[in-house]
Image: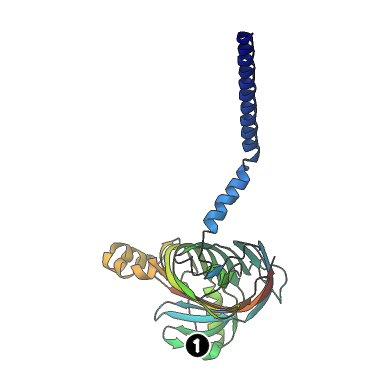
Amino acid sequence: MLAVSSALMAQEEAVVDVLDSVGTANEGDSLSLSKREKKPSWFKRAYLFADRVLSPPRDTNYVDTQDNYNWCAEVQLSARFEQFQLDAGNDFNIRVTPKWRTRIGPFFGWRFAFLGYNIDLKSVFMNGDDTDLSASVYSAAFGLDLFYRRVGGNYNIRNLTIKGTDYSGLLQDQPFDGIKVGMTRVSFYYVTNYKHFSHQAAYSQSNRQLRSAGSPILGISYAHNRMSVDWKKLANMVNEINNTDYDTNALYGKQINDEFSFTGGYGYNWVFAKNWLAGAELTGSLGYLLQHTATGTKDEDMEDEQSNFIKKFENFGKKNIAFNGTLRMVVLYNNGPWFFGTQGYVFYYQYGNGLMMTRNMLGSLYLYVGFNF
């Protein structure tokens, strides 16, 4: 009897072990299935990766990342000033400026990306001769600016010198629609001290600077530049007013080039009161130009230039080097959900083609109000 009982107990223990193993296997399958069900989609994984890259950890004593807000909307009023100069040495020099342009436009942002369009109050619809489009991506460590600009038909003559003769007094403030300027620029920059200095706090309002801080800024950019001048129309103006017989056939009327440049500078955010920020950023770029237009004034000049190495070397800076400088200044109030402020922007750009040096200065003043949500 005792032997039979022991055998029965052994069988019961074996059955229990089998049931336990089956239950454990089922539990493991259930956990494995649960893990498969909870594995994030490729879209969510890509989003999380982008979020780690675009929003790395920062020092919360200096920067409030405002993670509870994902969207931004604002209305911006802007006024623009420009000065454009063509300098061909003793042969020719002209400086023109357009009238002040007042624009208004909506801007929208999603944490990192910022897109806007400014509408001229005098011309609501887009004008191919005078168009500004801009888009920006602002992250903690780096940023990307896209800039498309076409200007023409809105200039007034300020200074004009031809062959040593100053015609500025005769043509002062005369309208001239014979200059057209175009620029398409893509700029990428890196903020080295992003843990303490917030570029977003000053220029996209998606962060808040809590303590004053600054940072060196490094970058690269590409630009496609186009400039054309109707020299015949300008000569006709001079000849009609001054009774001269000036000929501009020796001058080419178009410059087209591609520019590749390196940028360096410094930005600083000063928190002078609670929720208030005053910021400034100064950067400069040095670039190399690939020219797409001829550089001489006459065929024999071009042949001489091609055969004269020294002259090529001396003119290298005039033909192949571009320089630009940018100054940004901002004062704003940002309490989290609401913000308002003013921003100033000055951009100086200089490049040549061996025949003429082009200098362009663009200044803008912005007033804006918006909210994060």
Q: Quadrant of the N terminus?
A: top right
The part of the image, by quadrant, that contains residue 37 is top right
Is 252 situated left or right of 35 in this image? left
The part of the image, by quadrant, that contains residue 30 is top right
Q: What residue sits right under mark 1 in the picture?
A: 167
Q: Residue at x 30, y 70 (%)?
A: 314
Is 292 situated left or right of 372 in this image? left
Q: Residue at x 45, y 67 (%)?
A: 193
Farthest bottom residue in view: 169
Q: Residue at x 45, y 70 (%)?
A: 215
What colour scheme governs how the chains and residues are painted in the rendered image of this protein? rainbow
x and y, in percent, of residue 134 in the image: 60, 66
Q: Quadrant of the C terminus?
A: bottom right
**167 or 287: nearer the viewer:** 287
Say few, some or many: other residues with alpha carbon within 10 Å of mark 1 (under 14 / 14 to 19 / 20 or more).
Answer: some
Does 27 appear above or below 267? above
Residue 349 in view here: no
Q: Secondary structure at mark 1?
A: loop
